[in-house]
């Protein structure tokens, strides 16, 4: 399965050269030479849906092209296990979540099964998110370096879940977080590595005006009317209802339309419930379109973002919020909540506008919809910011550096 | 048989005498002619004298022998048909010997003179083989014509063979003609530093009629076909400049952000933690914005100034922190002491320390640097600026910022090398005077390149 997923995204490393420059690619090769042949085994919980799978599907082949023996496996679990991990996810994000002893037992039993059955054989075990975290129990037997990659916002975690997870996290050699606020007091080294977007992916590549128009026609959107777009999974933490509230405040004075578009993930059973609530809330408002985009519709997402006048990301909690980088890469002005990794991408008034409430989001939307010059300047800065800091080549570089740093303790490493 | 010879000895003696007479005349003529020719050629100073004389001396006598044999046939008692056949054979041998001689002579002369051509070096084997084949073909045609063989199919066959050869080696032929063009123009010489519009650059180390070889600053050898060279726009920077005894090796520094897990919620916490953290933390918070916000001019102030402004509303302190001149400190320890001193002075004058707004704690981050050599070297200032154009901002960052402050060198690496290698004090000082904290790294790159270009013009 991993091979099938990876084979869909086999961009050659040279193809990034026109975007980031030859020197950047040369630097990656230089680092790759120092790690040639190293076996890196990535493990997460799904091959499709969500940012982690998307990033791995692209990073793993690029690592291979640099001479590193990178692989990707997923743990197995039934519906009950993924219900529990979804609860973990919400609880780690700080939401009130009732976690019972039975839930913990389900997590432990499924993890043990994976520990027993999963073939692990590498120099570096790169374990993504809480679902496979217990695999570290095999560290004494397998040796090697173990990294826990946390993609979610754990700045205010539910203490019961965090303490449960922490007993495993402490066994790793290092943890990687996406934003400074997510770091915890841990006895292991912690690194800050932001995720990234792939400028060559269907979701981010350039599109013709014909392609964009076709998508707008398909969903019955008016290309002449200013469009506010939020792209995200139908998840409470993305606050889609709050988005509608903010939009309705703006719509009173400015002619515009709202598009709420997103999909579902195989490890997120809550999506359908949220989608129903959003549809109920939007019902009767002709200026609001709620679009359930099936998996693999990346070009449609791309077209919607490119057609947007302003892109909104009004999350209550956010891991990193890659949809922000996607929007900025398309030179779009962005209004986003100052949560999770968003402030790393949206530098208030430089690359977008930050908000802390429904009112704040509505005010920022009005500013951008009424001032195209300001919107254009923010979009331009935003693209440059993403080019330097949030493209996949930077991500790749930092992973390579991480693998090197694991073998050194000093602040300056000479190779 | 003996009886027949005794009876007809006069008939036999005449052709033998004629043949011997031609041989004697041949020996005499060779002696006289070659003495004169040798003197004449010595006088003219022509380099091919020895080859010409030595190569033709033997065949010259051989031709007199053939002439003698030809004349002897006229006096021989052989039937007319046999005489005609013998004459044809003798004439054919003569033609073959001429062809053979021409092949050897041109081969030796070409080897002699092609070796004298230094740049671009001609494709010797290609030319000698070409001449050899041409003479051979002409010889075959003459012989065929002489024997009365039909020429049309032979010519057709030859034309087809030539066509196939031309098509098969069209690139080579194109390169050779381009080589003629380059040689005639005299625009490029070995040792010149050239740059092609397609990006290749370096010193020309070898020129042949087919290719041009360039040694690049990253020590690679590029072979450019002449046909490509004539199509490209080529900048020729001319002869090498003064070479440094020790080339400048470009390094790059890539950093990884390491979270310390430490965070401050007010000024007291900020100072207390700052006192205990390593220099790499101070380095990160005073320098990371230079790379991450490359596109912004002016760039944001250091993290401490930004945080006290945005999260504590301590605007006066923010301005004091932003105004700390990082460039004035030669060590991170001294810079850290200065930051701590400014905050402590401020809190002494303004004791009511505010708590952070919301959740905007100050998170202490450490910079872990990985320093690694690039393949780029520069031995003179021209190579230096060409490498400067292509290295990453990380590499520039390493040689300008890290060397001075974090590695506690007296100056940036570029200025030190320029001063030590070439004694170019003014240029080195100019680069050293660049304040790297008030412009983008790209602007610094341009500044350095422009100043060096001005100097080497």
Image (spheres, coloured by chain):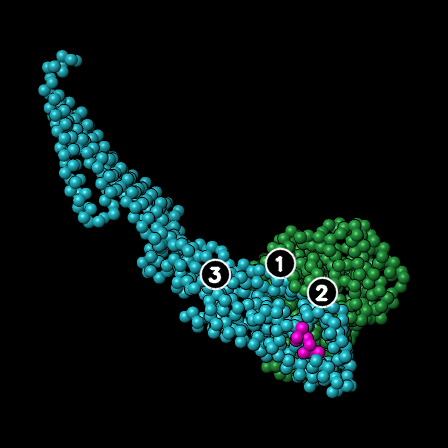
Marks 1 and 2 sit apart, C-alpha to C-alpha, by 20 Å
Q: Which residues are magenta?
A: B333-340
Q: Which mark is residue B237?
A: none
* Residue named by callout 1: A415
Q: Between A353 and A50, which is closer to the camera in this rendering? A: A353
Tag on residue A191? 2
What residue occupies the far bottom of the structure in this picture? B349
At x 81% / y 57%, what residue is drawn? Answer: A134
Picture quarter with the N terminus of chain B: top left
Task: Say which chain tag 1 marks.
Answer: A
Q: Nearer the viewer, mark 3 or mark 2?
A: 3
Q: Position of residue A254 (x, y in %)?
A: 67, 83
Residue at x-position 41% and y-position 62%: B240
Q: In this view of the protein, can residue A272 be seen by the observer?
A: no
Q: What is the drawing colour of chain A?
A: green
* Gap in angstroms between the C-alphas marked 3 and 2: 42 Å
In depth, the one of B395 and A300 nearer the eye is: B395
Above-or-below relation of B43 to A348: above
- Give the residue pinned by disc 3: B245
Instruction: Specify whether residue B421 is in view.
Output: yes
């Amino acid at each position: 399965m991993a091979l099938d997923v990876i084979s869909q995204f086999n961009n050659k490393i040279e193809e990034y050269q026109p975007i980031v420059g030859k020197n950047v690619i040369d630097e990656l090769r230089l680092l790759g030479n120092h790690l040639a042949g190293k076996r890196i085994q990535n493990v997460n919980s799904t091959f499709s849906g969500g940012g982690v799978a998307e990033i791995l599907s692209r990073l793993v082949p690029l690592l291979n092209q640099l001479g590193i023996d990178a692989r990707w496996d997923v743990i197995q679990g039934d519906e009950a296990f993924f219900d529990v991990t979804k609860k973990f996810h919400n609880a780690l994000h700080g939401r009130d979540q009732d976690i019972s002893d039975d839930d913990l037992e389900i997590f432990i039993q499924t993890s043990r099964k994976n520990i027993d059955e999963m073939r692990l054989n590498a120099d570096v075990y790169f374990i993504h998110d809480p679902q496979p975290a217990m695999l570290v129990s095999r560290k004494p037997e397998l040796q090697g370096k173990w990294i826990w990659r946390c993609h979610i916002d754990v700045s205010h975690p539910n203490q019961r879940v965090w303490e449960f997870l922490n007993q495993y996290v402490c066994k790793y050699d290092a943890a990687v977080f996406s934003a400074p606020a997510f770091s915890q007091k841990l006895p292991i080294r912690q690194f800050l590595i932001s995720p990234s977007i792939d400028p060559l992916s269907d979701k981010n590549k350039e599109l013709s005006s014909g392609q964009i128009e076709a998508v707008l026609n398909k969903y019955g959107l008016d290309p002449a009317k200013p469009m506010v777009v939020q792209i995200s999974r139908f998840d409470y933490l993305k606050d889609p209802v709050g988005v509608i509230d903010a939009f309705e405040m703006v719509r009173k004075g400015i002619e515009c339309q709202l598009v709420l578009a997103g999909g579902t993930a195989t490890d997120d059973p809550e999506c359908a419930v949220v989608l129903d609530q959003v549809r109920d809330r939007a019902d009767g408002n002709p200026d609001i379109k709620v679009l359930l985009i099936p998996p693999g519709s990346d070009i449609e997402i791309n077209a919607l973002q490119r057609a947007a006048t302003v892109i909104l990301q009004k999350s209550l909690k956010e891991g990193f919020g890659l949809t922000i980088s996607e929007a900025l890469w398309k030179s779009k002005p962005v209004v986003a909540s100052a949560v999770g990794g968003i402030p790393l991408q949206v530098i208030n008034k430089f690359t977008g506008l930050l908000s802390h409430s429904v009112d704040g989001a509505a005010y920022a939307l009005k500013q951008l919809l009424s001032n195209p010059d300001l919107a254009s300047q923010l979009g331009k800065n935003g693209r440059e910011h993403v080019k330097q800091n949030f493209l996949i080549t930077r991500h790749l570089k930092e992973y390579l550096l991480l693998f090197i740093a694991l073998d050194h303790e000093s602040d300056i490493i000479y190779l | 048989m003996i009886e027949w010879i005794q009876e007809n000895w006069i008939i036999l003696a005449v052709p033998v005498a004629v043949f011997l007479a031609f041989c004697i005349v041949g020996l005499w003529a060779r002696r006289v002619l070659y003495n004169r020719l040798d003197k004449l050629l010595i006088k003219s100073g022509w380099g091919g004298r020895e080859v010409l004389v030595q190569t033709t001396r033997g065949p010259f006598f051989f031709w007199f022998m053939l002439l003698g044999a030809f004349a002897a046939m006229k006096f021989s008692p052989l039937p007319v048909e046999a005489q005609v056949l013998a004459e044809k054979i003798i004439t054919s041998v003569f033609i073959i010997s001429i062809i053979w001689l021409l092949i050897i002579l041109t081969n030796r002369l070409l080897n002699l003179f092609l070796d004298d051509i230094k740049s671009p070096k001609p494709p010797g084997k290609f030319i000698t083989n070409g001449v050899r084949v041409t003479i051979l073909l002409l010889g075959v045609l003459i012989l065929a014509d002489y024997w009365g063989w039909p020429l049309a199919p032979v010519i057709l066959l030859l034309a087809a063979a030539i066509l196939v050869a031309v098509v098969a080696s069209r690139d080579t032929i194109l390169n050779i003609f381009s080589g003629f063009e380059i040689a005639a123009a005299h625009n490029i010489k070995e040792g010149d530093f050239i740059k092609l519009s397609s990006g290749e650059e370096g010193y020309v180390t070898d020129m042949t009629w087919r290719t041009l070889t360039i040694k690049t600053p990253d020590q690679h050898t590029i072979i450019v076909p002449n046909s490509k060279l004539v199509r490209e726009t080529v900048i020729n920077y001319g002869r090498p400049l003064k070479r440094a005894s020790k080339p400048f090796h470009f390094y790059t520094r890539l950093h990884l952000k390491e979270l310390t897990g430490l965070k401050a919620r007010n000024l007291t916490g900020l100072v207390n933690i700052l006192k205990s953290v390593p220099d790499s933390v101070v380095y990160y918070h005073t320098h990371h914005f230079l790379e991450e916000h490359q596109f912004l001019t002016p760039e944001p102030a250091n993290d401490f100034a930004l945080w006290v402004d945005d999260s504590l509303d301590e605007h006066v302190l923010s301005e004091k922190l932003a105004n700390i001149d990082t460039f004035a400190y030669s060590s991170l320890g001294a810079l850290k002491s200065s930051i701590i001193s400014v905050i402590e002075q401020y809190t002494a004058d303004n004791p009511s320390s505010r708590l952070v707004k919301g959740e905007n704690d100050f998170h202490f981050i450490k910079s872990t640097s990985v320093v690694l050599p690039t393949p780029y070297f520069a031995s003179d200032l021209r190579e230096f600026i060409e490498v400067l154009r292509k290295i990453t901002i990380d590499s520039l960052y390493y040689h300008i910022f890290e060397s001075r402050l974090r590695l506690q060198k007296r100056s940036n690496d570029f200025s030190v090398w320029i001063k030590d290698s070439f004694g170019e004090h003014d240029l080195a000082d100019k680069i050293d005077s660049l304040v790297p904290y008030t412009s983008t790294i790209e602007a610094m790159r341009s500044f350095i390149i422009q100043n060096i270009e001005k100097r080497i013009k």
